[in-house]
Amino acid sequence: MRRRTVLRAFGWGIGGTVVLGGGGFGAYYLSARRNTVGKVSFDTPLSIPALARSRRGASGARVFTLGIQPGETRFKDGKPTRTWGVNGVYLGPTIRARRGERVEFVVRNGLGEATSLHWHGMHLPAVMDGGPHQTVAPGGTWEPRWTIDQPAATLWYHPHLHGSTADHTYRGLAGLFIVDDERAEALGLPSEYGVDDVPMIVQDRSFDADQQFAQREPLAGSLGVIGDEILVNGTIGPYVDVTTRLVRLRLLNGSNARLYHFGFSDDRRFSLVATDGGLLAAPWETDRLYLSPGERAEIVVAFAPGERVELRSYPAEHGGVLGRLDGFDDRLDICQFRAAGSLSGDATVPAVLGVAPDLAGEAVAQERSFLLASNQINGRPMAMDRIDFGVREGTVEVWEVTNDNGYLHNFHVHDVQFQVLTVDGGSPEPPLRGWKDTVLLVQGRRYRLAMRFRGHTDPNMPYMYHCHLLAHEDNGMMGQFVVLGEGEQVGVPPGRHRHP
């Protein structure tokens, strides 16, 4: 009903007919498409986030200190923009650790309000997850610790406090978390950080007349804030000097709501080598790649000496009736690559990369269905004091997830990487055949996701599952589950008291 109400309020006809009479919304709609192709100067070198420093703690763990702080960033000429950052004024350092390594963090909140840091894509105890139950008070310190227990992958961290995730992320709190392992290193993929292995946190932002972030939502949009400027690692109009024949790009859609449809200006093909949870079984050659908010991808691109080419976002097909207002018709120049006159390196993309997800033949302990609509999941909004269900440790479950209200959604599950078994009963497309923790939900399609829950049991401290369009998450499109050990039952979440 909400969608029809929006359409009627602004003079839309049911069935996709737009009533343009009287100006106003009609003029706004027609001007909503943004095209920056050929209009970006590309006059600033791409900023590369520093690698986070660490020390060896008394327990032998690597200890990282992360200070969340306010500051100012000069994105453009004129006034600086008020921003937040981690160990800096905007975004945060890239954390890098190895599989099997023990890590500890000292997270200090220097803001005037509570916030959190969630380790998106990480398998770890729920109490260390950095979700809504692990907020850090102003001036407070949080010290999570765990052992890295998953394959090499590009993960990330960002705030995850209930009701304010969109605001805190938009202000600048985010960074990459790269996990390394020997298997991935042995493949010989481009690996020199910031040279031929380039992190790219892609975000959209809007600025007001005073150069401050403007978190305005579209007049009748559905997704949240859609910005009209593209930043990569906090850089507007970035370029990369290419010195090697092959370059690996670690792409993160770090936007609150915008869907990116990545491709190059000359339609060159590239190799998708990894998704959220790590390496694909084999590279996939393509010239286009969708990433919804929170998703990551590693691609390898070949360059020729002396050429220049732009990474772009092309129009997308999943926008629905209001898609233009949510950026689905936009054509955006993102970053320019400038190849040197001679290029070094003899790296190749191996025909075999990782191990394909293998849950399709496993015994399924439980099947569950999730319907996303009206800022709710299965008809209920998020409640901090309600654990929706428990899963049994060591078992495999299959979750069928459907987007059923005409707007874009995606689906993220904490603690696990899942296998997309089928989409509407058919085999998933190649980008969905690796391990995933976040998946784009095209309207009306049924996604069957298989996941194994291993270790880290806790009947009281929940993990989250939710839409990763941050306004949707904040408005209630989220739920909670716990992982149960043998004989355990669903308990009581923090802050709620058990009554007789």
Image: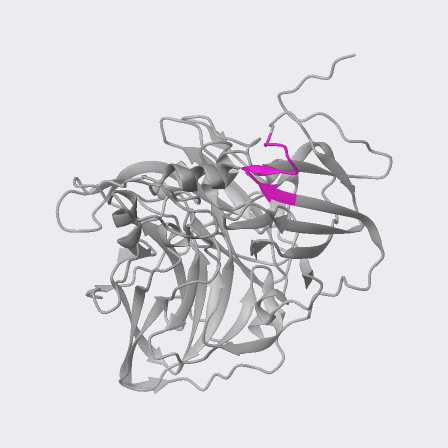
Residue 144 occupies quadrant: top right
Residue 238 in the image: x percent, y percent? 27, 63
Residue 371 in the image: x percent, y percent? 64, 44
Q: How many marks?
A: 0
Residue 247 in the image: x percent, y percent? 41, 75
Residue at horizontal 52%, vertical 72%? 272
User: Does residue 329 belong to the magenta stretch?
Assistant: no
User: Does residue 372 belong to the magenta stretch?
Assistant: yes
Q: Is residue 454 left or right of residue 404?
A: right
Residue at horizontal 39%, vertical 64%? 315
Q: Residue furthest top?
A: 500
* Residue 248 visible in the current orientation: yes
Residue at horizontal 37%, vertical 54%? 324
Please name whichever residue, 92 or 334, is drawn nearer the observer in this view of the structure.
Answer: 334
Q: How is the image coloured?
A: one colour
Residue 185 occupies quadrant: bottom right
* Residue 60 visible in the current orientation: no
Please name whichever residue, 403 or 1, is drawn nearer the observer in this view of the structure.
Answer: 1
Residue at horizontal 35%, vertical 67%? 312
Q: Which residues are magenta?
A: 371-382
Q: Is residue 239 left or right of residue 176?
A: left
Q: Quadrant of the C terminus?
A: top right
Q: Name above or below for residue 242 compared with residue 146.
A: below
Q: Residue furthest left?
A: 78
Please name whichever residue, 245 or 167, is drawn nearer the observer in this view of the structure.
Answer: 167
Residue 81 in the image: x percent, y percent? 23, 42
Q: Is residue 441 left or right of residue 36?
A: right
Q: Is residue 216 left or right of residue 16?
A: left
